[in-house]
Amino acid sequence: MSGKATLFTAFLLLAFFACTSKKEAEEKAKKSPTASELAIPQPEVHGTEIKSVELTNPLKSEWVSTGKSIYETKCLACHKLTDERVVGPGWAGVTKKRQPVWIMNMITNVDMMLETDAEAQKMLEECLVRMPNQNVSEEDARKILEFMRSNDGEK
Amino acid sequence: MKHRHLVLFITAALTLPVLLSSPGCKPQNPTSAVEGDAASKVYVAPGKHDEFYNIVSGGFNGQVSVYGIPSGRLFRIIPVFSLNPESGWGFSEETKPMLNTSHGFVPWDDTHHIALSTTNGEHDGRWAFVNGNNTPRIARISLATFRTEEIIEIPNSSGNHSSPFLTENSEYAVAGTRFSYPLDDKESNPDVPISTYKQNFKGTVSFVGIDKETGHMNVAFQVLLPGVNFDLARCGRGPSHDWFFFSCYNTELASTLLEVNASQKDKDFVMAVNWKKCEEYVKAGKGKKSKVRYAHNVFDEKTHTGTSTIKDEVVVLDPNELKDIVYFVPCPKSPHGCDVDPSGEFICASGKLAAVIPVFSFSKMQKAIADKNFEGEFEGIPVLKYDAVLHGEVKKPGLGPLHTEFDGKGFAYTSFFVSSEIVKWDIEKLEVVDRVPTYYSIGHLSVPGGPTRKPHGKYVIAYNKITKDRYLPTGPELTQSAQLYDISGDKMKLLLDFPTTGEPHYAEAIPASLVAPKSVKIFKIEENNHPYVAKGEKEARVFREGNKVHVLMTSIRSHFTPDNIEGVKMGDEVYFHVTNLEQDWDVPHGFAVKGANNAEILIMPGETCTLKWVPDRTGVFPIYCTDFCSALHQEMQGYVRVSPRGSNVPLTYSTGNKAEPTGEAK
Ligand SMILES: [Cu+2]
């Protein structure tokens, strides 16, 4: 490397006089945008908050059965249909205890709920596992709700 | 050896005065090369994103790595031709077929060049292609999943170096053989004396077709060529769209001591191939079918499984019969890079041992072909006259030019290996306008969008061969390194050093806005068609097929189902097919079993992966999740009981059964 160093020193002595002024360089630097200006902020996208849910009786049997199959793929690992808690609480009685809007938001908007809703926060303290965002659409959440109602004995 | 050193010395002597008299600020020593504002130009604040993805070949590590530019932060290492125990690539049952070749399972290769897919000559953010040099292969990586989706072996090739450069609309990826070798069309490597090189050794370049929709590759045709060595290549663009240009060395047709014997002639060649014409000849049935054997491996995103197919035929075109598909252009001396400017008119070749950078003109080349302005033939292929096709020479630019990229503003940037520098020159005037030192021995360089019709300019990144004193020492082996330079002004400015894994050869950089929005976050569980998927815990089960035990297992924060398995016996092969039920971004689960002779598997949300385990002793074996997934991650575990061969323990499985206080093994 020492050969290289000598070579460099030689460059510098000669090139020194050709240097543009420091001020000029600074001006130039100011013109090019900084990286943070160019960076694209990318917050994670979640479902929007659900404000109201319409319930009707009798239950839509088609929704109940679709809701059941979504439950079996995406929810059953943590929620039993009884009141037994596994990872999350059992579903028995959930539609009596919680508002439909609360249930729907918990399914589709869990991060928002854990940030803002006192009841949801209390449950996190009990279960110690953040409910996963299972990427359930609003329509599918509604079908799960129908299945929950059926599980709670509604007709 | 002596002779060559002398040549270099003389070239150095001639070049030095040019270097010394060139204008610009020279750094005082390696540590003061950076000016005051550099840090703010590469600082990407916490939570902010980089402007470019830099997709970098990993050289001898067989991988591809992904860095952010300008920060130089490492985001991902993508296993391609290499085993990766971290993710189970090459260890899981689904990925083993991806490393299959006509030579069997080949778990390593040497990756050199990245080519990002383009539409109309501009990056489209769909795929990255990379070559395997040693056992000739091309891989396709999805830029939506950052995973290897396909690997195709190249028949009639040895050392797939000149690869995988793409045509403007990604119609083809090329694969030029580095080593010429004896070929025949009977699916064999003829056993001939090496001394018969000139008679028996042949080269090929292959055109690998790429499906517009799926990206799937097929070896469309090959061109049979004299036994030279192919180095690098670039497609034409715009007016030269139909052409492909390759650099070649060893026109001496030597087989030993190439550093001397392949440096005898003043000029080697740039080879121009009219691929459109080739395509027409193939359609017209003018190709000859050759018996070969090569593997084609495709990973299906829905079954999460790779399949390997062996193919046995390829179409070969012979330019000795089809006279208008290949032309040679004389080029001083052992050219490495062969780079086409954004306009498609100029082809810059870098003779590693030459004292000039010759720049060829495509329109002059076309005229010379029309006028049959040949200086002769080489092995039956016309050689165009040097002066007739030359746009001009950049005189004494530096020592050891390797590779050139462009900024879209009329300037070219060439890396110089021997003199460790980047030289900026004016393409039209052929004058050097700036030079900066690199630390040390730069190979390829990359300008974001540099090999496309519309370069983004802004930065040039140097990929260096030697790191020496740049970082804290780590024994005899040091990390490799890249260096980022600002090229937005008249003068290049060093901004940042960052370490890289493997030995980075070529790389491309692409605006984040072309890649990030398409990024896949999860695999949808509904679309999982793996033959052993368990879509939900209800489908989890264990069953026996002879001595094979299949475990369809699910994972979710924070347990496996089933987590207690009994009835496995010595001599059984156990297949854990683990489905990750999560549908949340960035929540993989891992799976490992004590004493397994392979690796773990890392299962992405919605995916199924299979780990094969052949127990080597009886007893109870723990299984657990290796990827910290939740506060109860440590509790994500279970047991598998292995009984002696012939014992009558029934195959049972469960989750959540309370332990019996008096339970007794039977
Ligand atoms: Cu886990």
Image (cartoon, grey):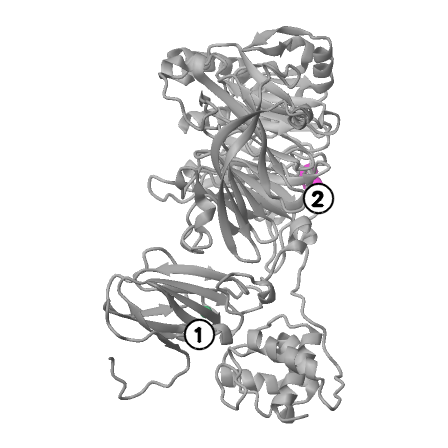
Find disc 2 in the rendering and name its residue: A32
- Res A31 → quadrant: top right
Chain of the residue that carries numbered disc 2 in the rendered image = A
| Whether marks 2 and 1 lie on the same chain | no
Horizontal arrangement in the rendering, residue B312 relative to residue B124 (left or right): left
Quadrant containing the C terminus of chain B is bottom left
Chain of the residue that carries numbered disc 1 in the rendered image = B
| Nearer to the camera, B86 or B490 | B86
Horizontal arrangement in the rendering, residue B56 relative to residue B286 (left or right): left
Report if residue B557 is visible in the image. yes
Which disc, if any, is residue B532? Answer: none
Q: Residue at x 39, y 74 (%)?
A: B563
Q: Which residues are magenta?
A: A24-28
Q: Position of residue B212 (x, y in %)?
A: 67, 42
Q: Position of residue B623 (x, y in %)?
A: 36, 68
Q: Is residue B180 magenta?
A: no
Horizontal arrangement in the rendering, residue B600 relative to residue B12 (left or right): left
Amino acid, disc 1: Thr
Quadrant containing the N terminus of chain B is top left
Q: Residue at x 50, y 14 (%)?
A: B251
Which disc, if any, is residue B561? Answer: 1
Q: Position of residue B558 (x, y in %)?
A: 46, 75
Report if residue B72 is visible in the image. no
Amino acid, disc 2: Ser
Q: Position of residue A130 (x, y in %)?
A: 54, 77
Whether B270 is drawn above or below B435: the answer is above
